[in-house]
Image: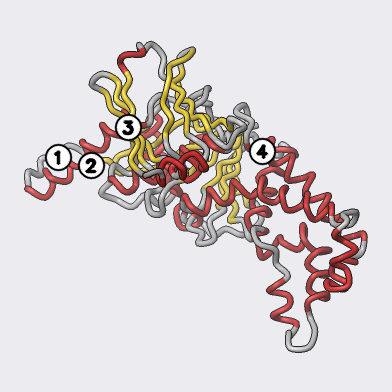
Amino acid sequence: MRIILYLGKGGVGKTTVAAATALRSAQLGYKTLVASTDIAHSLADSLDIPLTAVPTQIAENLWAQEISVVADIHNYWGTIQSFVSSTISGPGINNVVADELSAFPGMDEIVSLLHINRQAKEREFDRVIIDAAPTGETIRLLTMPDTFRWYAGHISKLESAVMMRVLKPFAGKLLQGPSELLEAISNLDAATADLRKTLSDPTVSSYRVVLQPEKMVMREAERAVSYLGLFNYPVDSVIINRILPESVDNSEFYRQRRAIQTKYIEMIENNFRPLPIWYAPYYSHEVVGFEALAQLAADCFGGSDPGEIFYRGIVQEIVDSGDGGYTLRLPIPFIGKDDVRLRKRGDELFITIGNFKREMILPAVLAKRRAGGGRLRDGFLEITFLPEVETIKEETTP
């Protein structure tokens, strides 16, 4: 069973690459589902076939689905939604408003992920290809299992907490809810824990970043890899999409565009090592329908099976040091200690190794801390980041 999730900035071609991957996988004989978790679905447009919230067979070995939270949320949240809606309704709040307020934050993300987990557990398909929402929404989607489990743990403790006796007179029946409420939360918490395990299992799940050779797109892709590393989600490759071909067009405009792309392709190759990189051309035609998608898969992946695991290993790891600080670990084998230089500026980290320079965008948890130094150990570059208290003291010391 394989789950492959494509993410990246809006408009870079995630949907077409995901659809092309699924089509190629199906043609290789694997029973494949391609599903969209983006609220603004475009998977049906890419396949040029109408889709629904239910997996629909569209070709031999190939099913497609546009996940609808509206259609499914009551399957997972019926007991809680009904209870909360009846609890908060009252004078001054009509039923429509009460029902809207009863939708807990993040439930759309949880429902989408539970769809993915269900496919993994039921093993109805050999492969599930996910066309994800733009990067920011997808990162929020992927952090929801951890976030929800934190809230569920605290909610479950309310029944026995000392504060319960103090809060009950003010909270009324909200904190005196039926046992079904806590049972529903407990069941969803268990499902979410199982989901987290599936999403971080490198033998099952792979994350692939799609980008175009442009500065803003590249920077967002770097942030995506950083955050995926923060949550231990395995990234196995990068796809550079819409690469301009060499052409007889000798116009100044075309030469400039080619020069810009060449510059950023080189940066992407440097900054995303050791990840494998795939290259997809910019076509003169729309990539819509099976024929165009099959061509994209062939041009991008060549003779390789896009369902393979292309990279096994840590791209980057963020380790909590236990004292409020963190250590960023990057695999850099075969490098001597004297060859490495580090510089941090805001949320950017510059690593220079000989004539090679890597520019990284740091996640917020590291960006706001001062770098405490780096060392090479067992083929990894380990960069320490000081606790926030130490950072504040150093910044405010005259």
Residue pictured at 83% horizontal, 76% vertical: 86
Q: Earlier in the sequence, mark 2 or mark 3?
A: 2
Q: Quadrant of residue 173?
A: bottom right
Residue receiving disc 3: 343
Q: Earlier in the sequence, mark 2 or mark 4?
A: 4
Query: How far across and down, in percent of the image, does residue 82 sit?
Result: 82, 70
**Badge 1 vs badge 2, beta-carbon distance below 8 Å:** yes
* Residue 272 vertical position relative to residue 293 in the rendered view, above or below: above
Q: Of residues 77 and 22, which is closer to you in this image?
A: 77
The label nearer to you, 2 versus 3, is 3
Residue receiving disc 1: 247
Is disc 1 placed on a helix, strand or loop?
Answer: loop
Residue receiving disc 4: 125
Query: How far across and down, in percent of the image, does residue 308 sit?
Result: 53, 27
Residue pictured at 67% horizontal, 46% vertical: 145
Say which amino acid is labelled 4.
Phe
Horizontal side, residue 236 vs residue 254: left or right: right
The label nearer to you, 1 versus 2, is 2
Q: Considering the image in quadrants, where does the C terminus appear?
A: top left
